[in-house]
Amino acid sequence: MLALLIPVILYDYGTIKNPIWQLVATVWLIISLFLTPLISIEGNAVIVGLNKSNLLMALIFLEYAYIAITTWGYKFYFNLKISNPTFFYYLFLLVLGIVTVWISFFNTFILSASEWNQAIWNWDFSLINPINSAIIKNVWQLYFSALDAGIMEESARYVFLITLLIIFSRKKGRATYSILLSSIIFSLLHILNFSTPGANIDSILFQIFHAFGFGCLLGVILLYSGKLWLTMLFHTFADFLNFSLIPLGYGGSLVSNENTGVIVLTVVTVIPLIILMIILENKKTRAVIETNIKKTFIFSQFSPIW
């Protein structure tokens, strides 16, 4: 399948010249891959878990991202090297990493929390056990699913950001607009999770709000660090935590309460937005991001759209 899709990407998707249609085609491909029926196979736990995890779909999309981006004339960097990084650069990157890890823990433990300290810092790690997961019984499927999310969704974010940076290339706040709109697209695609067993309006709304905030954070990290592997790592870690929650880890009163539930959605949305604004308003961090954009995403031969 990976081999057969190469000419399709090259001659169908690769020939799209307008960045708006490149973005639309990418979203359409994601929807098409997500809705593709899963073929049932028999085998040992590893093979069955690999098949059910949709890791193949993630590899297909990573292949698409690389081939499509390079065919469109842009550059694909898995690990962009920063020229003469300063102590300040590493310090900010460390702060971003700490906030991302904290958000990942908060998003997981808020599902079991009856008091705020249980979600904010007093985490019960006994509730994390991939062998006794409440939602995925095959432990190999759990590992592969976490990796699937990291590869698939961060590859999509890369394509979204590249096309949006071209679209907004004449805007002064092109990085801000691109991160926000890519996060909106990323979060709204979680509506597709209505097709998964046990999904309801409350759970999907939580996923959408969290995905938007988390997407803003990872979008900043991607543009600031230039390292796609780093955002994949953070995303995989976050999904591993969420998938590994045992049955006792659900039913927390904070997330189910009407009043505190609104606060939860505010936290997972507003904190990443505050971090986004701080970084993009800081001259040093903005300079790093603009340098990475020029090196990675935008080239003079492409005419701006807006």
Image (spheres, rainbow, N blue to C red):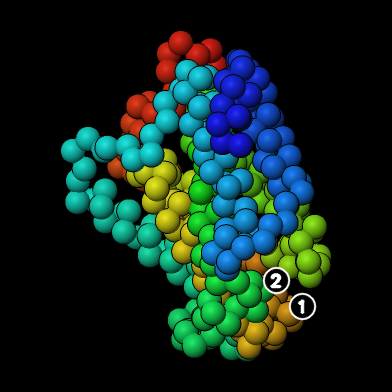
Mark 1: which secondary structure?
helix
46, 218: nearer the viewer: 46
The kind of residue tagged 2 is Val
Q: Residue at x 57, y 39 (%)?
A: 60
Which quarter of the rendered picture does the C terminus lie within?
top right
Q: Is residue 284 left or right of residue 144?
A: left
Mark 2 nearby-residue class (10 Å; few <14, some 14–19, many ≥20): some
The kind of residue tagged 1 is Glu
**Residue positioned most to the front:** 43
Residues marked 1 and 2 touching at CB (< 8 Å): yes
Compared to 20, does 300 lie above or below?
A: above
35, 183: nearer the viewer: 35
195, 179: nearer the viewer: 195
Q: Is residue 284 left or right of residue 210?
A: left
Residue that carries the numbered disc 2 in the rendered image: 262
207, 280: nearer the viewer: 207
**In the rendered image, is residue 212 in sight?**
no
Residue that carries the numbered disc 1 in the rendered image: 258
Distance, label 1 to label 2, CA atoms, is: 7 Å
Mark 1 nearby-residue class (10 Å; few <14, some 14–19, many ≥20): few
Q: Residue at x 60, y 78 (%)?
A: 133
What is the x, y in percent for residue 104?
50, 67
